[in-house]
Amino acid sequence: MKNVIFKKTLFSLLLLLSFIGFSQSVPLSKDSKISVITCGLGNETYSYFGHTAIRVADPANNIDLVYNYGAFDFSTPNFVAKFAKGDLQYFVVVHPFGDFMNEYNYEKRSVFEQELLIPQESKQKLFDNLNTTLLSEDRFYTYKFIDKNCTSMVVDIINKTLGGHVITKKGDTDITYRSILFPYFDGHFYDKLGTSIIFGTKVDQLGTKIFLPFELKNSLEKTTFQNHPLVAESKTLLSFAKETPASWWNNVYTYIFILGFVVLAHNKVVDKIYLLILSLMGIFFVVVGFYSFHHELAMNYNVLLFSPLLLILIFLSIAKNKRWTYRFAVLHLIFLVVYALFILNKAHFLIMLPMIITSGFVLVRVAIRNKKRIPIII
């Protein structure tokens, strides 16, 4: 979802006030229209999933604005810590439609428009709600990847205006959030691997909520209001074919090559380095799981593979404590089997399988090296 970065919010407030004449709102004409804007996918991390916004156009009042719930401020004190913790404040801003389109034209990303077919009084109420939000403390919200983002906020304010749960998800409610996300990472293998590792049990729930722009676009096409379609037929305002990037390193082949090297090297130092990397990642997951408010990062069963206890195994191996090194190796082999069985039916099983196999080889080697041999008496 596109995150538009602003250093100041004052610009958007002054822009809106210049249109509405410092009043609560302005009466929209009968020629006004309000639309949901869906923006295409990009190849930057912030744009992998597209973007959602609301357009208000009224030629009679010289209004053509885009309300965007995806803004945050890089100058926020402790920005990185707040983003990681999950209490970074996002907010709504407003753009002139022309500037908004110029940005997406520059980025070569498609833009689609779906006009809301709602009564004039509902248009006015939605416009008033947008302006009230923009000019109050309600313009800020705490971002949540699934539950509260640029798309879900648009759904919420439209449903609030129409007086009920008019917009609900249509289709793909019987597959998990993780399965829904996977296709968006085409051409970005290590982002796909990274999210497979860092996301916990929440993304394995059935994807019943609208949280992605194109989910909303598709659901709107199947939604009715007062016994007629909620939106008009989708219009394509900009059309670009998404370019899937090609990279010599960001692909499954380098992943297999690195893990294959670990398996075939059959080297104690390589094995220790591999286990050290896994243990440090496990420690990171545990810390983030307790520290962060992001529900997607909590209850991360991937720690069975990336176990912090591997650090103890490495220490025991260096200390040449064969008995406990062997026991910890066997313990982690049990963890590995449990982990493999647990994710067997999950979307990220195949992408994690090479790492499961590699860890199995390494742990078996460690166990064999440290297994106490019974002397044979002749």
Image (tube, helix red, strand yellow):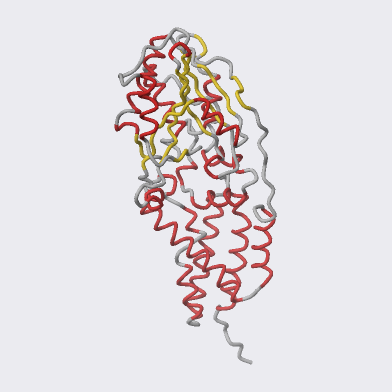
Foreground residue, 370 or 248?
248
Pinpoint residue 210: horizontal percent, then vertical percent: 48, 30
Q: Position of residue 219 (x, y in %)?
A: 53, 23
Q: Up-down: is 261 above or below 185?
A: below
Quick check: 242 above or below 75? above
Residue furthest bottom as drawn: 378
Q: Residue at x 54, y 45 (%)?
A: 45
Residue 317 percent coordinates (x, y): 51, 78
State the image quarter where residue 242 is shown. top right
Residue drawn at (51%, 38%) of the image: 177
Number of labelled discs? 0
Q: Position of residue 56 (x, y in %)?
A: 46, 19
Q: Nearer the viewer, residue 201 or 30?
A: 30
The answer to which quarter of the image holds residue 333 is bottom right
What residue is drawn where x is 44% and y is 49%? 297
Instruction: Say which quadrant the C terminus sits in.
Output: bottom right
Closest to the observer, 52 or 297: 52
For residue 110, above or below residue 325? above
